[in-house]
Image (cartoon, helix red, strand yellow):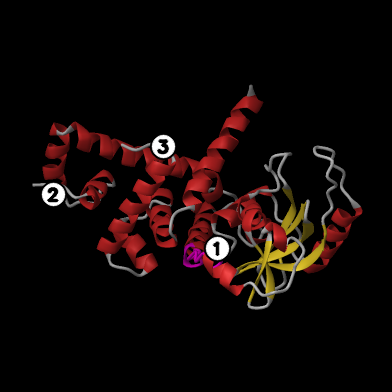
Amino acid sequence: MGAVGEQEATVELGNVDRAMARLPAEQREAVLLVMVEGYSYKEAAEIIGCPVGTLNSRLVRGRDALLALLGEMP
Amino acid sequence: MTITPERLAAFADGELPEAEARIVEAQVAQDSDLARQVAAHRALRQRLSAHFAPILNAPLPDHLLTQLAPSDPQVVDFAKARDRRDRQRGMPRWTWIAGPALAASLVLAVVLPGQEKGETTLIGGRAYAAGPLADALDSQLSASQPASAPTRILLSFRDSAGAYCRGFSGRVEAGIACRDPKGWELRKLIGGSRGEGGDYRQAGSQDAELMALAQDMAPGGALDASQERAAKTRGWR
């Protein structure tokens, strides 16, 4: 049973990794900082060195691309 | 008033000022399509943070831990926070320089092993992995690669300059590739170690030769599975 669970986890890893790898760098960066590392938009924008509005739109584009790649279009 | 996708995302992430958030919240409550988008945003966020949690929570390397007083959690937390921040500064700004069109224009009229199969290419006179070989170097983890993978990753390590390198063994060629801004430079290349015999697999003498070469190049030894996965997530930078 454990083996089946592990296998599923591996498949899941592959999907998310592949989808992330297909994002343009700036979108992946925005998604990683906000959705994975949990930074606020302001903090993430400071880390990247871009305006908050730019960070916000990169995040939305990256998110939409990920949802589409993972087959989870809203 | 229409809600832009950016504003809706900011709402879903709790980034709007309270008054504005209340306005958006009221609209979301009346619009099932907006509500679905907010739910999808939050579900993705949850999925990503669950996916990457093992990497973010990976323990510090022993040599860092031993420098700290283990009985003082505050010190450890501080070190972890600093480690995180350092990693963010070094976050890869991926540039896929070796796009197919660009790579093709840079190919010189020199035949490399594997070039005719699209697995190697020349960039600026140096040999780089391309196509399926580059994909395998980018994405395959030595711990979890499928047994049927055409290219097998033998190990990953950092060379003396800190670049990530990977020893690989495929049907066409075997060797050691190290990551630089242009891609995976093929530092060592020896003949392929696989016969045509499908699933029959035996570690050939070339695999042993490669491991010996890697040992000479890797002052810190091979990466373990979690280090390898973390390196992959950061684009091998």
Kindly report the secondary structure that dominates the magenta region of the rendered protein. loop
Q: Tell me which amino acid carries mark 2.
A: Glu
Locate residue B100, reporting x and y percent.
Answer: 55, 63
Name the residue beneath numbered marker 2: B20
| B113 or B61: nearer the viewer | B113
Q: Residue at x 13, y 32 (%)?
A: B30
Q: Secondary structure at mark 2?
A: helix
Spatial CA distance of label 1 from label 2 is 46 Å
- Which residue position holds label 1? B100
| Proximity of marks 2 and 3: CB atoms separated by less than 8 Å | no
Q: In the image, what residue type sits under mark 3? A: Gly
Mark in the foreground, 1 or 2:
1
- Chain under callout 2: B
Q: Write down the region rendered in magenta.
A: B88-98
Task: Give the labeled residue for mark 3.
Answer: A71
**Does the magenta-highlighted stretch encompass residue B235?**
no
| Residue count near mark 3 (Cα–Cα under 10 Å), binned few <14, some 14–19, many ≥20 | few
For the residues beneath circles 3 and 1, the answer to whether they share a chain is no
- Measured along the vertical axis of the image, is residue B135 above or below residue B48? below
Badge 3 marks a residue whose secondary structure is loop
**Residue type pointed to by label 1:** Pro
